Structures are given as C-alpha cells and as structure tokens.
Amino acid sequence: MKLTIVGMGRVGSAIAFAATMEPIVSELWLLNRSIEKAEGDAMDLTHASALRNSNMTIQAGTIEDAAGSDVIVFTASVSPTRADWKRSDLAAGNKPLLEHWLPALAESSPNAVLIMVSNPVDVMTYAAIQITGFPPERVIGTGTLLDSIRYRASLSHELEIHSDDIRAYILGEHGDDQFAAHSVAMTGGEKFFPSETSRRLFRETVNVGYEVYNRKGYTNYGIALATMSIVDSIVYDLRHTMPVSVLVDGFLGVDDVCLSLPTVIGRSGVTRILHPPLSEEEAAAFRHCAAKVRETIETMASE
C-alpha cells in the first residue's frame, strides 16, 4: 500500500514521523514545493525506520513518483500573517495551493482516498471535492477529530475515566463555532448531561489549539496522530467511527457544505455518516456552523 504526504512543513513532517513509527504501508512518499526539504526528511526518516523492524520504503519525489497512491494526506498551507489570526483567514491563501497540487494528484492517483489537513479544513475539504472530482466518500477532512480527542482527554481527567471509554464528540466546524454534542455524550451507556463542568471543559477545548500555537508557534503532534488514526482505519478497513469533516448529506436540512459528523471510515473512505439525535440547541449550532462555512466558501470563490 502506498501513502503520500503533500507538504513537509511541521505538520507534514510530524505525520511522516508517525507513519514511520507505525509502518502500516509499504511505500511512503514525501512531496513538497522544495524537493530538498522532502529529501532531507526522507533520509532522516529512513535512518529512524532502521530501528523499527520495518521494510517500508521512504522516498521524496514528484507527483509522478506518487502515482497510484492509495492514500494521500494533504497538509500544504500558508502561514498566518497576524497575531490574532483565525483558521478562516487561511482560506484565500490555501485554495491556490489546492489548485496547484490536486488536479495532477487526482489524475495520477484516481482511486486514492484523500485526507485534508490544511485549514480551514471544512472549506478546504469542500474545495478538494470540487477540484479533484473525487466522489465525496473519498475526501475526508480531519475536522473536529483532534478537538474531540482534546475534549475527551479533559473529561477523562475530570471524571477519572479512561478517555478510550468516553464517547463524546465536538461536531460542526473545526473553528470557533464548533459545539459539544452534550446530548449524545456517554460512557458505559450512561449519558453525561450538560453541566457547568462540561461546558467549561468545552470552552477550554475550543481555545486550546490557539494556545498551543501561541506558545510554540505551531501545532503538530496531536494532529499527526489524529491523521494517522484515519489512515489506520483506511488501511486495515477498521470501520472506526470518528468525527471528521465530510460532505453533509442533508442532515438537519444541511447540504453542499463539509462539516464534522460521526463518520465510519474504512478501506474505501467514508462508508457511513451517522446522524446523532442532537438537541434543538445543538441542531441550531450545527446549522450555524454550516452558514459560517458556506460564507467562507462563497467569499473565497469571489476573490
């Protein structure tokens, strides 16, 4: 199986490292605007791979080299230009990157599952579907997967229950308008009813990505492992349910926009989108997310 990562910045490099530590594919290809950077990463990771009892090949190359990829992870992105940046600010700069890379990638790997990591990820996932012409089932954005992982980690610490046993989702937009689906959060079949504690933990979750960025200048480890959990479910056809950004299929009257919903992921990509019974307040929040993402899509199209 062949995995290609596009964009060898800090996020792409961290995903490549995670893929090296858990070598679940036979070929790993690294693509970057600067081939020298990708070559350096490939050399370094090959040395690391020697300690992993692995025969996975790791190479830097071109789109032609990556032809026939089974999974493509797209991380290429512009950098924020101001201190008080929001993810939506990156849309105008990142769309040209998609237009540069994706047509040729789609042509050379027509059966690949494409995982979008670049922000604003919901808008970029939607754009990727339009640019590649791939069926929506084969284009997945990382969405609120990492947000949900962070939220579960906070709940785990507060409740003293292992995070693997907590079913709690952040849904909607991967951005400031995301929401916690309190009404369907549970462990052991017991629901977590909304409380001031759960609301406080959610508020902290919304801001934590920015806090990490402000302290170290970027985020990379969490999103790397979150991305690899998607890759893992694809490679092994595990059918794990994850909150990822997908083209919404009419749920709550929303369509023609990408948002995060609990989604079953297997070898072919999206095998099923689940429709949790949200409260009226949560349903309104989901529709609000759709309106905000649609606004960014239309603004980007007009520029």
Image (cartoon, helix red, strand yellow):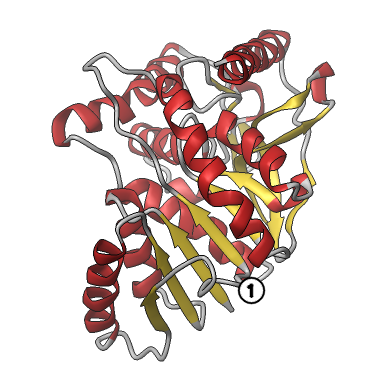
Secondary structure state at the residue bearing disc 1: loop
Q: On the picture, is 291 further left or further right than 87?
A: right
Q: Nearer the viewer, residue 200 or 138?
A: 138
Which quadrant of the rendered structure holds the N terminus?
bottom right
Towards the viewer: 226 or 193: 226
Q: Is residue 60 above or below residue 54?
A: above
Q: Is residue 148 visible?
A: no
Residue at 69% from the left image edge and 9% from the top image edge: 284
Residue 156 drawn at (x, y percent): 39, 39
Residue 264: image x %, image y %?
71, 51
Q: Is residue 229 visible?
A: yes
Check the image and report above or below for 221 versus 157.
below
- Asked which quadrant contains residue 89, the reply is top left
Decide if residue 296 is on the left or right side of residue 176.
right
Q: What x and y, as percent, mark residue 205?
A: 38, 26
Q: Dot 1 surroundings within 10 Å: few (below 14), some, or many (20 or more)?
A: many
Residue drawn at x 79%, y 20% is 254
Q: In the image, is residue 238 above or below residue 241? A: below
Which quadrant of the figure has residue 109?
Answer: bottom right
The answer to which of 240 and 190 lies nearer the viewer is: 240
Q: Where is the C terminus found, in terms of image quarters?
A: top right
Q: Amino acid at mark 1?
A: Gly
Q: How many marks?
A: 1
Left or right, residue 120 beside residue 217: right
- Residue farthest along the left direction in this orientation: 215
Residue 259 vs 207, above or below: the answer is: below
Name the residue at 71% across, 53% down: 138
Say which residue appears at 26% left-offset and 88% top-offset: 50
Location of residue 85 in the rendering, given as x and y in whole percent from the top left corner:
31, 18
Residue hosting label 1: 68
